[in-house]
Amino acid sequence: MAALRAALHPRLLPVARDRAARLDRPAPWPDSLPEWLERCRAVGRDRSAQILLSHGPGDWNALHRDVFGELVFPLQLVIALDAYGTDCTGGEFLLVEQRARAQSRGTATVLRQGHGLVFTTRDRPVPSRRGWPAGAVRHGVSTVRSGRRRTLGLVFHDAA
């Protein structure tokens, strides 16, 4: 998992910095993932937030954000390890965006085995007539109907 995270970080870093600029926020992420993780350790966050999730029939994951303090990398990745329709049914990846002065909007995505989905950790810039306000986003997993759904979650900041 560490090698995959290290390989993906330089590709996601420009996207993270662009989002920070659009939201008029600081972009505290150095070019090097080890340097970023050292900053996390310096504030007492020395536990990897990488996770292998396994859901069986009836299991689900509530909508949430993987935010562990102030030092947050704004993107993360989920990778499907099982074949949808063969190994499991249900368990779609859920994203729900809270929209200003409007109803929340949700999407459900079936992840194919070996495929990944990069998504926002906390919020994303949303174009508007007044610039780029932040759209709050949460993620989760719909109810697994059959089989076992396993995914790998890669978070680019550490937890306490």
Image: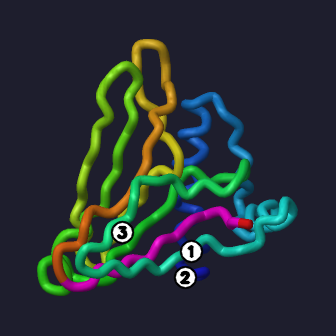
Give the image location of residue 147, x and y in percent.
20, 85
Q: What secondary structure is found at the residue carrying circle 2?
A: loop
Alpha-carbon neighbours of circle 3 within 10 Å: few (<14), some, or many (≥20)? Answer: some
> Which scheme is used to colour this image of the protein?
rainbow
What amino acid is found at the position of numbered circle 3 in the picture?
Gly
> What residue lies at 49% left-to-right and 19% top-to-bottom?
131
Q: On the rendered structure, is 62 left or right of 110? A: right
What amino acid is found at the position of numbered circle 1 in the picture?
Gln
> What residue lies at 55% left-to-right and 58% top-to-bottom?
66
Q: On the rendered structure, is 38 left or right of 76? A: right
Labels 1 and 2: the sequence-earlier one: 2
Labels 2 and 3: the sequence-earlier one: 2
What amino acid is found at the position of numbered circle 2 in the picture?
Met
Instruction: Tell whether label 2 touches label 1 (CB within 8 Å).
Output: yes
Q: In which quarter of the image is the C terminus?
A: bottom right
Res. 116 mark:
3
Occupied quadrant, residue 111: bottom left
> What residue did someone put label 2 on?
1
In the displayed structure, 132 sits above or below 65; it is above
> What residue did someone put label 1 on?
50
Give the image location of residue 88, x and y in percent.
19, 80
In the displayed structure, 17 sits above or below 94; it is above
Most extreme residue toward the right is 42
Q: What secondary structure is found at the residue carrying circle 3?
A: strand
Give the image location of residue 78, x and y in percent.
41, 68
> What residue lies at 47% left-to-right and 50% top-to-bottom?
120
Residue 41 within the magenta-colored segment of the rendering: no
- Magenta stretch, overall SS: strand
Residue range in magenta is 147-159
Q: How far apart are marks 1 and 2 (CA)?
A: 8 Å
> What residue lies at 40% left-to-right and 19% top-to-bottom?
128
Give the number of the mark in front: 3 or 1: 1
